[in-house]
Image (tube, rainbow, N blue to C red):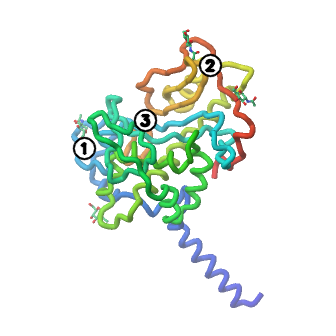
Amino acid sequence: MSVSLKFAILVCFASVVKAGLSLPGLFSVPNTFPNISACVSQPSFFSCENTTVITNTCCSPTPGGLVLQTQFWDTYTGLEKRGQLLPKNSWTIHGLWPDNCDGSFDQYCDLSRQFDPSPSPAILPDGTVVPSYTGPPVETFIQAFGRQDLLDYMNDFWVSQGSPNTDFWGHEFSKHATCTSTFDVACYGPDYRLHQDVIDFFDAVVRAFHQYPTFNMLAAAGITPSNATTYTLPQLQNAIKAQTGSIPFFGCTTNGTILSEIWYFSHVHGTEQFGTYKTIDSTTPSSCSATGPIRYLQRTPTSERDVRLFP
Ligand SMILES: *[C@@H]1O[C@H](CO)[C@@H](O)[C@H](O)[C@H]1NC(C)=O
Ligand SMILES: *[C@@H]1O[C@H](CO)[C@@H](O)[C@H](O)[C@H]1NC(C)=O
Ligand SMILES: *[C@@H]1O[C@H](CO)[C@@H](O)[C@H](O)[C@H]1NC(C)=O
Ligand SMILES: *[C@@H]1O[C@H](CO)[C@@H](O)[C@H](O)[C@H]1NC(C)=O
């Protein structure tokens, strides 16, 4: 190899390394975020624990400071034939919800960012009709930002039951992220690029989901999916509390006998985009039987696929 060719390769390698920080990627510095330099001068607090009035709602979710990272344990998707499969050895993402500090919540807060093909509810408590979205699926927004990495991850871990994944993502964004003040378009300043807030929300959901590896935490306490064994609610609660410090919400179907959901409650320091989550106990009583046996079902093998769990 000639000296000049070696040099050229070296230069090329060096520029790749230098550019590394700005390359889009799941855990690299994203190129999409609200202007958090405006937050530097704000008081320091966890959401719902502020002792003075929050003046810059771009810096802390307000009023939705009770943040829930929600997950599903589904045993099938209903769209297996289309290749929509569940990730082996992992729960799946439901969303990242901004409850108000008292546990109440708002939904579909900005109909100019309505990307949900099947709004639920279709009529809000105040009578407002939420129109069905018929535009390009939100996955095309992700592609337009060159974030195939994010899209691949979401297709692995943010899997819908009974509808295409992209419709479910549109639903979660429109119903919940539009009520999360830190994703307001106004927070992005004059450099806002269309749908930046959508990509940013999806990134934030993935980051939050990574803090709560439910499958692994339960498995580490000997609680694994089984069609032969049952568990109790205190067993499930204690396994998670031992790792997060708080009791999440456990959701069950079929009269509280089949485990299907978990919601991690938290307060966040700073924005949901970058903030640190501090878990708190669930403010919603479990829908699982308090005393009876609970089934944590094995999935149908053809509903699952291998995924890379920690990219
Ligand atoms: C971000 O906020 C800072 C501090 O408030 C301000 O000086 C700057 O102009 C803002 N940048 C954008 C792009 O809005
Ligand atoms: C926290 O901030 C919210 C929103 O600005 C405000 O309504 C609430 O009164 C604040 N809490 C305290 C104790 O100041
Ligand atoms: C749930 O439990 C109640 C009371 O034991 C019973 O009447 C009902 O049939 C059960 N429903 C299902 C779906 O198992
Ligand atoms: C476990 O039971 C559920 C519910 O009956 C069923 O759908 C699933 O296929 C079973 N899984 C295995 C591996 O037997």
The quadrant where residue 223 appears: top right
Between residue 206 and residue 162, name the one nearer to us.
Answer: 162
Is residue 207 visible in this depiction of the protein?
A: no
The circle drawn on residue 174 is none
Q: Residue at x 63, y 76 (%)?
A: 13
Q: Position of residue 120 (x, y in %)?
A: 42, 38
Residue 228 in the image: above or below residue 57? above
Which residue position holds label 1?
Answer: 54
Judged left or right of residue 77, residue 262 is left
Label 1 CB-ligand 2 distance < 8 A: yes
Q: Is mark 2 within 8 Å of ligand 3?
A: no
Mark sitting earlier along the chain (2/1): 1
Closer to the chain start, of discs 3 and 1, is: 1
Secondary element at tag 2: loop
Binning the other alpha carbons within 10 Å of mark 3 as few (below 14), some (14 to 19) or many (20 upward) gives many
Q: Which residue is mark 2?
A: 294
Give the mark, 3 or 2, whose residue is nearer the N terminus.
3
Mark 3 vs mark 2: in front:
2
Q: CA distance from mark 2 to mark 1?
A: 42 Å
> Could you tell me how far apart the alpha carbons at marks 3 and 1 are, in whole angstroms?
18 Å
Pick the residue in front: 311 or 21: 311
Residue kind at label 2, given as amino acid type: Ile
Residue that numbered label 3 is attached to: 266
